[in-house]
Amino acid sequence: MTPTLIGNTTEELTALLTEMGLPGYRGKQLARGFYTRFARDFDAFSDLPKALREKLAAETQLAPCSERSVQSAPDGTEKYLLNLTDDEVIEAVYLPYEDRTAVCVSSQVGCPMACSFCATGTEGLARNLTAGEIVDQLLFMQAKHPEQRISHLVLMGMGEPLINLPNVLKALHLLHDEVGLSYRNMTVSTVGVVPGMEKLAAEDLPITLAVSLHAPNNTLRSELVPLNEKYPIGRLMEACRHYTDTTRRRITFEYVLMAGVNDTEKEAHELGELLRRQPLCAVNTIPYNSTDVEARYQRPTPEAARLFREIVASYGVTITQRYEKGHRIAAACGQLKRSALKPGSAMRPLPLFSQIPVAEPTEPALEPAA
Ligand code: SAH
């Protein structure tokens, strides 16, 4: 199989070149080229001898992602469909803000978690992304916007990052060590995969962990998030406490507000009660973004959303509303899906959690309070 260069550390590139009978020290130049100058083509490596470039072009592949299509919104948000080398397709979003530029990237092709309100969840899982494919989503968008340094990364695209933890961790390390992103500007969002949270805590990285909570009681949460059957709220909260105790980092609880489903005063009081003793946490509300798969759920009125926040805040819990971008081009949270399916793609049927292996080995990143 043709090796892909993006996704390797400088040391790994050095070893790869040596194996190919090429001078290993060129690995550093290669890494600099695509991780810090965002080169996507061997021709851009004018600092490498032509013969070396030609051999690399013949025997390796530089980048795993290529553009399939892009949609732009007036606020500057861009949603990319990216082709992978096996013809699978993923989505990644570029999000320019006044004070920062963020990207929202995918961790899997599809997702096996099947949350009832999420577009990605309707399609099942095809496969995990490699570390290179995760990192390259950022590198690709950075190359598109050379004038604007991408400072923040959120793993809130397609997929559940904590069931692809080894590759996600490698991607975070590459982004930190090779690309120069700060761990503090990286957010990993999980639906509540407790063993993955425990492993992540043990890594003790100063990233932000976001936990998609969406409901304050088990009956409702199990309806929205099937994984709750396996890791119910009590167990999840213990894992959150362990995470904050270990890392001293605050957890952001994501709460997608759906009219009449989880946004009433009853749930607001329950949520306040649930979180008032949880140390180092904040709630981030997200008004439901409509998808083409689920008509049952509606966005709450702004008044209902405000009342919900006021009630939760009255328990001393920090709560903000996500400042939204991109829903006009269906690039907002939960709207990402594989709009272009690979024919015969190996999509696995929807979830059998007992069979999902948990692979071995910011502040709410995007949103000023409304
Ligand atoms: N699997 C991870 C990360 C991907 S989803 C997780 O569940 O956290 C990123 C966020 O978008 C999650 O909080 C998810 O619940 C939310 N989301 C999904 N569908 C949505 C929708 N239709 N409207 C708003 N947010 C949605």
Image: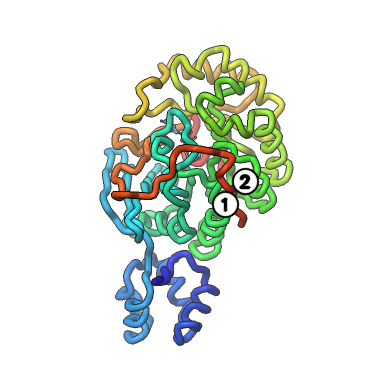
Q: Is mark 2 within 8 Å of ligand 1?
A: no
At horizontal 67% and vertical 35% (from top left) the residue drawn is 280
Report whether 263 appears left or right of 203.
left
Instruction: Tell which circle, 2 or 1, labels the residue nearer the N-terminal end.
Output: 1
Marks 2/1 in contact by CB < 8 Å: the verdict is yes
At horizontal 59% and vertical 30% (from top left) the residue drawn is 228
Marks 2 and 1, how far apart at CA: 7 Å
- The amino acid marked with disc number 2 is Gly
**254 in relation to 23, above or below:** above
Q: Which mark is residue 196?
A: 2
Q: Which quadrant would the N terminus be assigned to in this image?
A: bottom left
Q: Tell me where residue 82 appears, x and y as whole percent.
A: 33, 53
Report whether 209 appears left or right of 155.
right
Q: Which residue is mark 1?
A: 165
Residue found at the very far top of the displayed protein: 265
- The amino acid marked with disc number 1 is Leu
Q: Tell me where residue 68 appears, x and y as whole percent.
A: 27, 53
Q: Tell me where residue 217 appears, x and y as whole percent.
A: 61, 21
